[in-house]
Image: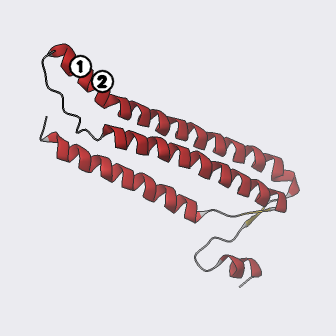
Amino acid sequence: MNDDHEKTGAHESPPARIGEDKQATEYLANERTFLAWVRTSIAVISLGFVVTKFNVWLRELALHLDPNARIERTGASLPIGITLMALGGVLVVLAARRYWVVNQSIARGKVSPDHGLVILVTVMVGMLALAMIIYMLLTAAKL
């Protein structure tokens, strides 16, 4: 076993070595990856905004169709939308952290994957998707 494998542990990938001639390419790839994370974060934040405003739009539509309608405020679009916006904010912070860590690793000539970040983002998005599915199933009967 080499020293790099012992330092990273049995479950982590050993770091990849980067030659000085490839560092510029790696820096630019890291920047493109960061910008993709930023675009994704903006999309999640925007979706959260739309979900948050969806309940307001439904109330306005109901009042337009029937001005005497009694509108209940029991929807979960506000907490779901805020959760989406918060997730988008967390994603961009995680992206900035990962960008910084990878840049430092490129400068040292060794880069390794961050399995923890992949697992964290997967769990966060999976939990949010599950919460939205449950909400949709619970409210589908009311439609």
Q: Nearer the viewer, residue 54 or 140?
A: 54
Q: Quadrant of residue 115?
A: bottom right
**Residue drawn at x 21%, y 14% as measured from the top left:** 64
Residue drawn at the location 54% of the way across and 41% of the way down = 41
The quarter in which the C terminus is drawn is: top left
Q: Which residue is mark 2?
A: 57
Q: Which residue is mark 1?
A: 61
Residue 44 coordinates in the image, percent (x, y): 47, 39
Q: How far is mark 2 from mark 1, CA to CA?
A: 6 Å
Q: Amino acid at mark 2?
A: Trp
Count all numbered tags in the image, as a single digit.
2
Quadrant of res 66: top left
**Marks 2 and 1 close (CB-CB < 8 Å):** yes
Report the quarter where the N terminus lies: bottom right
Q: Is residue 75 above or below residue 60?
A: below
Q: Residue at x 66, y 49 (%)?
A: 96
| Residue 38: image location, x then y, percent | 60, 40
Crowding at dot 1, Cα within 10 Å, few <14 / some 14-19 / many 20+, comes out as few
Which residue is nearer to you in this view: 99 or 64?
64
**Horizontal relation, residue 130 to residue 123: left or right:** left
